[in-house]
Amino acid sequence: MIKRQKTGPAGSNRPAARREKGVRMTMHNLGEVRTALAAGELDEALARLMCGDPAPGRQRVSRLLDGFRQTFGAGEDTPVTICSAPGRTEICGNHTDHQHGRVLAAAVNLDFLACAAPNGTNTIRFQSEGWPLVEVELDTLDPKEEEKEESDPFDDILRIFSNDR
């Protein structure tokens, strides 16, 4: 059975787990996550994320696991964790907070869903659906000349409106 666990006593050390704001992020084998998903063990959490019906959440997580496996060659025994970050929209004041201004924001029923696994390197690789694979080398975080101004915001806007990703 897979479930989120509250953190234990200070100093407790459970294998393959990480502390994050009072919630322990536990990793499970990809196959275990698939089994739990199919058995409905994740339905309660998915219902909270999807504001009711867990069925769309099951489909999203299943697609996510399939994409993760295909992109990174993960096997059923690969330790993974599924993460969701809530979405928000800024009703007014967008980016004024960067200059100590005020923003009126509201939660939305959308989220960012990710599957993560350790890869044993100092490189983070991630892929968003419909976008190319990105690699970030943690050993060389200094800006690279060839990456500066690589993306023209106007081109990004045109690409979004033309659905040409």
Image: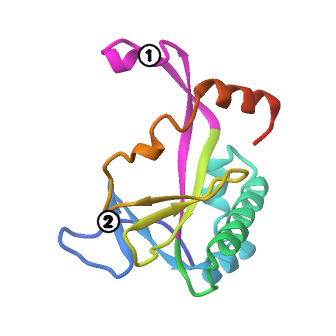
Describe residue 10's horizontal placement relative to residue 110 as left or right: left
Task: Return the residue at label 2.
Answer: 7
Instruction: Give the answer, above or below, for where 155 lies relative to 50.
Output: above
Estimate the x, y position of residue 14 in percent, counting from the top left: 32, 80
Horizontal side, residue 101 vs residue 108: left or right: left
**How packed is label 1: few (under 14 Cα within 10 Å), some, or many (20 or more)?**
some
For mark 1, what is the residue? 103
Q: Earlier in the sequence, mark 1 or mark 2?
A: 2
The mark lying in front, picked from 1 and 2, is 1
Mark 2, Cα crowd under 10 Å, few <14 / some 14-19 / many 20+, is: some
Nearer-the-camera pick, 31 or 134: 134
Residue farthest along the left direction in this orientation: 11
Q: CA distance from mark 1 to mark 2?
A: 33 Å
Q: Residue at x 52, y 78 (%)?
A: 28
Residue 130: x and y, percent? 73, 51
Q: Is residue 83 magenta?
A: yes
* Most frequent secondary structure within the magenta stretch: strand
Q: Which of 24 and 123 lies nearest the eye of the viewer?
A: 123
The N terminus sits in image quarter? bottom right
Q: Is residue 13 left or right of residue 103?
A: left
Q: Which mark is residue 83?
A: none
Q: Quadrant of residue 58?
A: bottom right
Q: What's the residue type where badge 2 is placed?
A: Thr
Place of residue 21 in the rendered image (x, y in percent of width and height, measured from the top left): 33, 53
Q: Is residue 69 magenta?
A: no
Q: Secondary structure at mark 1?
A: loop
Percent x, y for residue 71? Answer: 66, 70
In this view, the residue in front, 14 or 164, is 164
Q: In the structure shown, which secondary structural element does the residue marked by tag 2 occupy?
A: loop
Q: Residue at x 65, y 69 (%)?
A: 68
Q: Which stretch did the figure color magenta?
A: 81-109
